[in-house]
Image (spheres, grey):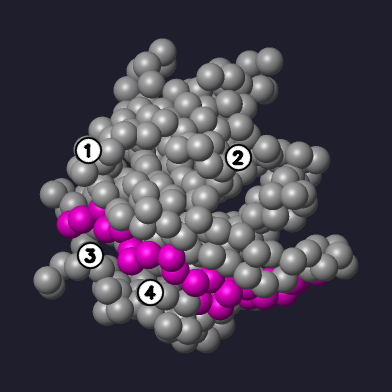
Amino acid sequence: MPNEIGAHDEVFHPAGEDPYWNESGWFGFHIPERDINGFFYYFHDVRTGVSGGGPALWDGSGAEIYDCLYYDWRWHQPPTGPMEFEDFSLPNSLRHQVLDPMRRYRLSYSQPGLDLDLEWTALMEPHDFGVPPDPSIPRHFDQAGRVRGVATLHGERLEVDCFSMRDRTWGPHRHDMTPSGDFVWAVASPESHWHAIAIGVGEDAPDVVVGGYFARDGVVGNLVKGQRRVLERKSGAPARVLFEAEDDLGREFQAEGRVRSVLRWMGWPGQLAFWTLTDWEWDGQRGFGENQEFFARDLARSLLTQP
């Protein structure tokens, strides 16, 4: 089908007419025995030729961008060479290489305090959110995988071998207009994992699932309904979360997540995100993942004043 996600999408897509057009890609990784979570994240504006992004790592020792383990997210990085999607580098040394389209990627970075040399391998085909019904909505997909490699943090060599999630988005990005919501996921094994995006509908109501997938015994279904509720908070951030959903195969599941570490992130304008490493349990098994909780600016202040 012409609109299916595939190898032809391993490019920076042509920009539409919307002045807020942008393209971004994210890869998550973690070292759970140290409560370390991290991201490798980039964005590119094909209209202006300006890119940005970078890596971050955090654990329980610091939850702010100024005191976490490492942070180098930079805006406005004009490329010093051609921006070919198959192999590009940003001025801060973040490098993305496609080794096998939609299957394998090399992710690297080298600056004082952090060296990354990671290889990401897919566990599944990309899960496509489909062609948006409105041209003001960007195209988006998510994909579970596994990442292996080395992170050398302030001279300490850390082995990385974990399950992971990645995403790609291209189209109009109005982050200041994005409603509050959540990006949640977990992987227990190549056959058992899930991902969801939920949107807030009210201060005291659970957030409602608007898309995602559920894999059980290697069989993938699309989420058709579900909700996410915070059971406990600490300093405004989620500490314990309950997620319930059903897929289009009629399979229901319930997952409870306990947050291990938090980064308070305002990388996108007009939003506060609690970006967490989360220890999830569902179907009698355990898997690490994340609970990314993002809020419109008008709600951020009240959350940060909570005990």
Q: Nearer the viewer, mark 1 or mark 4?
A: 1
Label number found at residue 102: 4
Q: Is residue 186 visible?
A: yes
Q: CA distance from mark 3 to mark 1?
A: 38 Å
Judging by the rendered image, the residue that carries numbered circle 1 is 250
The answer to whether the residues at label 1 and label 4 have Cβ atoms under 8 Å apart is no
Residue at 45% x, 38% y is: 283
User: What type is the residue that disc 2 sits on?
Assistant: Asp
Sequence-earlier tag: 3 or 4:
3
Sequence-earlier tag: 3 or 2:
3
User: What type is the residue that disc 4 sits on?
Assistant: Met
Q: With respect to residue 152, does 189 lie above or below?
A: above
Does the magenta portion include 113?
Answer: yes
Who is closer to the viewer here, 66 or 10? 10
Looking at the image, residue 224 sits to the left or right of residue 114; the answer is left
Who is closer to the viewer here, 86 or 99? 99
Give the quarter of the image for residue 262.
top right
Judging by the rendered image, the residue that carries numbered circle 2 is 279
Judging by the rendered image, the residue that carries numbered circle 3 is 16
Q: With respect to residue 297, does 81 lie above or below?
A: below
Q: Nearer the viewer, mark 3 or mark 4?
A: 4
User: What type is the residue that disc 1 sits on?
Assistant: Gly
Who is closer to the viewer here, 130 or 175? 130
For the record, the magenta segment spans 105-131
